[in-house]
Amino acid sequence: MKIQKLCKTTLILGLLGALSACQNQTHQQTAAQQSLQLQTQGSITGTVDSVQVPGNNQILITSEHEGLALRQGNTLKAHLHGAFKQVRLSALEEGQWLYAALEGSNDRVFVGTLDPSAAQLQPRFELSQTALLVDNLCLFADETNQTLSLFVSDGRGKAEQWLLRQQHQWLSTPQLLRSLSLPYDADSCAVDPGNGYLYISEPLGIWRYPARIEDNPSYYPVSLVAPYGNQSSQAVSLATSPSGALFALLENGQEVLYWDAPDAANSWLPAQTLALENGKATMMNLSQPLSTDKATLSFTDEQQGQYATAHITLNSEVTTKSLPVVRPKAQSQPATQFGDAMDDPAIWVHPENPETSRVLGTHKKQGLEVYDLQGKLLQTFEDGRLNNVDLRGGFSWQGRTISIAAASKRNDDSLAFYGIEADGNVFRLGSAPSGLEEIYGLCMATFEGSHYVFANNKSGLTYQYRVKASQDKLHAEKVRAIPLNSQPEGCVADDARGRLFIGEEDVGIWATSLSPTDNSKPVAVAKVGEHLVDDVEGLALSFGDSPVLVVSSQGNNSYQLYEATPPYRHLAGFRVGLDGFKGLDGASETDGLALSTRLRTQDYPEGLLVLQDGRNRFPDQPQNFKFVSWRDVLERTGLAKPQK
């Protein structure tokens, strides 16, 4: 698994961003206060943290003297020895919970299961692989990806995310997903599992980060401490509900700020202030059965060794907004250069032995690369800054029939051509000028016995070229211009129906004829909005009587599926997530893609979908291509019944 590092959040940049953002923020502390009645549950020497077991009268307690203890009233039900100082709970399945507890004598993190009916604590892992002196932890039960991970931090600006479970199965050992840079003296963390938000408290305020490694590594100020914001003092403990509500215990130990779930990514309702009655607290946890809007806040007063609870009715309910997740079967070797390198793939299918098919991929910094179906790099052509690539078969060249691939070359705004022999070997054919300034996207088509290339530029212009071979040379004749109002990139042709689809990045998808004599205006297929989030990037197409158009929606790291025939109905959407068992991460910043439903192998029984993993926001990690089973996409999106 590749380790991802978020860009360093310096104090100066964080403060400037926060001050700018807070000018238009509405998340203010309200003057009116509500009260939380604390119900003292017990007192144990050295108690540091506690959490009520949801739907149960048991409480899990950490003590620096008595260890990790499961108590029911005054009765000790289960016990682990150690100097424990923090505990978190997360649901596993009906009646089963996962606990993560920090043992303070040598900063060990213990992970295990809690069975309330049997009153048992069953250790599973001891996280000893981390190099951090762990000071804080929180759990992330991600239903979207069907994963469970653990965040740990050291309070000195360093944090890590570790994968524990996937698809309801334990990994043999915790696997490091990424390292993160956090503000110095980050004091507490909590995760909103539904929205995938990681909240961090530090002396200046509370910040929100992405909890999923595939999401863009942005950060956002939820609340800032005065004089930069309206928060009266630092939050020393955070907690979240499954519905997305956020709670922050302030360092005075007597006030809790409560934010309802945000109704938009960067929008917050005003915070309520909840005053603790009958006591003070230094730590806080939240537990909530998923079937109710009733939650229990667990409070611990370290100075007094007391633990107490308070009940609250939440304003928001648990909602499911996530897209289904498909996991890759394989991935290509990573790019040899860092940053924004890989861009667009194309799939060549061997006519007799599909297992030996090829994937061609552009490398925007050096040329064209050729892979087998396991992602092994077979050939490299260092021909310059190639952006998009596509291919078609049945091309006549020097008395034989080959496949031809075309790529947009940004060094000199030309069209670069490659041949593919019957055995899959790729070779250079030549190049031709495009007549475009700032050439960008590209796709190919066959129509009425001729081969065509469509190439576009950033000003919105698409040219159609008829490609011929004459006297052992290639010729690309411009036969048509298709104007759009703004920048396109992705395009794909439905040869069987004579239709071309073009993606206009900030607007949507258009369809037009493949005929070089058709000068009618393109018709709208889908607009940026509910499903598509700009930028609209790569396009791909399935074959058959009911073709499906696949679109990469870069703005929300998803792939959207549409009928490729009128009325172009939206069918479904999905994301590509990590596979911890295979050591494959997911796809972030979706970009170029290719689909071949003519390729049928054991791993890809109904076709292969190749996706570019556009990690240009993670400059310290090379990009690659993900190989996904089209059958898995159809099953996970409900477009096909799962095969037994």
Image (cartoon, helix red, strand yellow):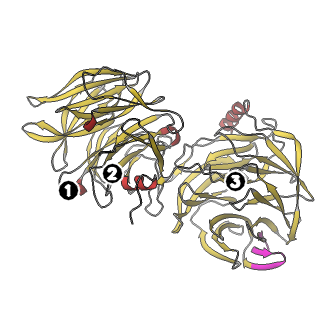
User: Which span is picked out in magenta?
Assistant: 61-77
| Type of amino acid under label 1 | Asn
Which marked residue is nearer to the observer: mark 3 or mark 1?
1
Quadrant hosting residue 443: top left
For numbered disc 3, what is the local secondary structure?
Answer: strand
Q: CA distance from mark 2 to mark 3?
A: 40 Å
**How many neighbours does mark 3 have within 10 angstroms: few (below 14), some (14-19), or many (20 or more)?**
many
Find residue 189 and name its label: 3
Say the numbered circle drawn on residue 353: 1
Q: Nearer the viewer, residue 283 or 628?
A: 628
Marks 3 and 1, how far apart at CA: 52 Å
Residue 202 lies, in percent from the top left, at 73, 47
- Reading the image, the residue beneath label 2 is 608
Q: Residues within 10 Å of mark 1 (few under 14, many from 20)?
A: few
Could you tell me which quadrant the C terminus lies in?
A: bottom left
Residue at x-position 53% and y-position 56%: 145
Relative height, residue 388 to residue 146 (above, below): above
Nearest to the observer: residue 542 or residue 189:
542
Task: Work out whether mark 3 precedes mark 1 in sequence or the reverse, and give the earlier one.
Answer: 3
Q: Residue 215: x, y in percent? A: 54, 46
Would residue 313 appear left or right of 493 to someone viewing this image? right
Residue pictured at 88% horizontal, 60% vertical = 38
- Considering only vertical position in the picture, is 579 above or below 416? below
What element does badge 1 sit on? loop
- Give SS at disc 2: strand
- Residue positioned most to the front: 567
Disc 2 or 3, which lies upstream in sequence?
3
Question: Is residue 522 visible in this depiction of the protein?
Answer: yes
Q: Is residue 415 left or right of residue 344?
A: left
Percent across and percent down for residue 304 are 89, 65
Label 2 sits on what residue type? Answer: Leu
